[in-house]
Amino acid sequence: MRDQQSTTQMQNPISQAQDAVKSAKNATAQAQSHPTEQAYIGAENAIEQAERAVAQAQTSENHRAVAESTEQLEEARKRLNQTK
């Protein structure tokens, strides 16, 4: 577990944002396939976490990766809102 934490802490803001967006997309898919209040709350929390990670990645010079993460996050947010 300690090695996993060290690896996570060493990730750069872009990879953290990409991982957070992936988690948000997965949580949204879970809420769509199993529409429960708990699933919605989990997806909303994952989206909020991804928003923070993408905001931190904005300082990166890799503008394309940030733009892709932002686009994917917006898509997940729209899908979740359509599911409600």
Image (tube, rainbow, N blue to C red):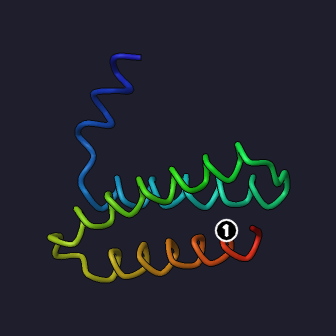
Q: Residue at x 26, y 81 (%)?
A: 63
In the image, farthest residue toward the top: 2
Quarter of the image for residue 15 reads: bottom left
Q: Residue 40 vs residue 58: left or right?
A: right
Q: Residue at x 34, y 16 (%)?
A: 2
Q: Which is more toward the observer, 15 or 43? A: 43
Q: Nearer the viewer, residue 16 or 30?
A: 30
Q: Secondary structure at mark 1?
A: helix
Residue type highlighted by circle 1: Leu
Q: Residues within 10 Å of mark 1 (few under 14, many from 20)?
A: many
Is 35 placed above or below 3 here? below
Q: Residue 9 at x, y = what percent?
A: 25, 36
Q: Is residue 8 above or below residue 30?
A: above
The residue sitting at 38% across, 26% down in the picture is: 4
* Residue 20 quadrant: bottom left
Tally the marks. 1
**Up/down of 20 relative to 2, above or below:** below
Q: Quadrant of the image for the N terminus?
A: top left
Is the C terminus in the top left, top right, bottom left or bottom right quadrant?
Answer: bottom right
Residue that carries the numbered disc 1 in the rendered image = 80
Q: Quadrant of residue 54?
A: bottom left
Q: Residue at x 65, y 55 (%)?
A: 26
Q: x, y (%) of residue 82?
A: 73, 76
Query: Which of the pair 52/37 is nearer the observer?
Result: 37
- State the image coordinates of residue 62 (x, y, percent, origin top left): 24, 76
